[in-house]
Image: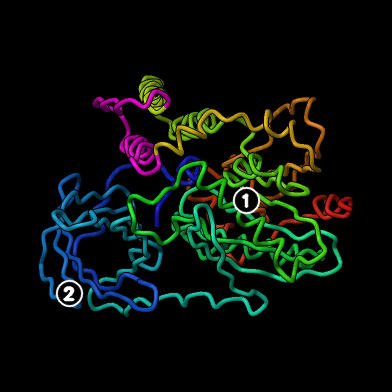
Amino acid sequence: MRRSHAALFLALAPLVAQPSAPSFAGTWEGAIQIPGTEMKIQVTLEGAGAAWSGRISIPPQGAKDLALGEVKVVGDAVSFVMPGIPGDPKFSGKLGKAGRIEGMFSQGGQVFPFVLARAGAAAPVAAAAPKPDPQDRELGFPGFNAFPLKGSVRAGGAHPYFAVMVAGSGPTDRDWSNPLISVPSHGGRDFAAWLQGHGLGSLRYDKRFIGSRDPKLDISLDAQLGDIKAALKAARLLPEARGKKLLLVGHSEGSLLSLLAAGEADAALLLAMPGISMGKLIVLQVKGQLESSGAPEAFQKQNLTYLEGVLEAIRGDKELPAAAEGIAQGIVNLAKSLTRPESRGFVRATMDLDPWGSAQRLAVPCAVVWGERDIQTWKPATVPPEFKGTVLQIPEANHLFKRETRDKASLAGPAALTTYGDTTPLADLSPLAAWLKTLK
């Protein structure tokens, strides 16, 4: 999978390293979960403190005791690469309470989960892939420049509108599943079911880069806006949408893109919309993490200054500034993700977009909705008076509008992810249901 933008998940990924723990030493066995199969692997890790090394064997490929590179252990996290292998394969995982390493394997733009248990322990059981919902109908349709897109259609009821749903940033698919979310999570599918319960059918689709291995694939702003317009066009031809108006539903970064295409819909619903430009949001997210880490002020200032330099380099289409000693590795990784050749143009085109400038120009009914406990995007202190649409904040709702009852101050980092999963119900969306009833 490929990532078009990393900003909106920064709040969930620690940027500042914690002390190392030598609990990873030994031999681990498990598998990479590739769709339709699994690839058995064996990993041996050796070391302590900051000095680690390792080997990997992949029996299905006849590989035995290949040396690992860049083996890093930080707290309960481990990462390593396979040097000299095409596609730059990399493993990144965490040691869970069950004593297993669970994480993500990436190679050539593809990302797959993996699970490892200590050799001799019970083999880790792979989670069953979610079965397609019987109420969904699979659909293919041409996107921008006829690029093939895949989606799911769900029939509605008596409501006069039919929804077209646009997913959020990065490798987030039509169901709002994302490898950065460590628990099974299909918030988009859940929201489609909620819409159906209020009489609205829907079309949700995978962004063009989901599952792609092509580094030359066009993922520009024009291409992604073209895909949204193509989805609206495809929806108007669906039997499930016959005689209905179209509601464009964008989530997170998808709401920002939907703003730019909403003129071709009959109404817009913007969920978890960035309340400020993406560039400013990135800085605020990183600033919040640095502050919560308790790092010295000088360290915080140095890292924020470096990040500002990265953003300026993107704006000016210049070379990425060198990271001096003292820059957190997480921020270096963020800088690299924002400046990848295939996505740099998209990042530059969206970084300084003014969401409210676009929202106040909309000529269709519009609602902007945030979760009260959202730590990724949040309701701004003030909303421009020129915006004539509806503004809602859902109590006890997180970024996926799942129920979150914990205090927002306690949700820094991965702790927030525990309520993103399928076992957490949606929050009480009654205010949103009331707005849907106003659409005629």
What range is drawn magenta here?
315-343
Residue drawn at the location 26% of the way across and 58% of the way down: 23
Distance between the alpha carbons at the discs numbered 1 and 2:
43 Å
Binning the other alpha carbons within 10 Å of mark 1 as few (below 14), some (14 to 19) or many (20 upward) gives: many
Residue at 52% over, 34% down: 350
Q: Which residue is mark 2?
A: 61
Query: Residue 312 vs residue 25: left or right?
Result: right
Q: Is residue 341 magenta?
A: yes
**Residue 241 percent location from the top left of the image:** 76, 65
User: In the image, is residue 114 above or below residue 7?
Assistant: below
Quadrant location, the N terminus: bottom left
Q: How is the image coloured?
A: rainbow
Which of the 4 image quarters holds residue 131? bottom right
Check disc 1 and give the amino acid type.
Lys
Badge 1 or badge 2: first in the primary sequence = 2
Dots 1 and 2: beta carbons under 8 Å? no
Residue ID for mark 1: 229
Q: For the view shown, which residue lies furthest in the front direction?
A: 145
The numbered mark at residue 20 is none
Q: Element at badge 2?
A: helix
Comparing 202 with 111, the one in front is 202
Between marks 1 and 2 in the image, the one whose residue lies nearer the viewer: 1
Counting the numbered discs, the total is 2
SS for dot 1 = helix
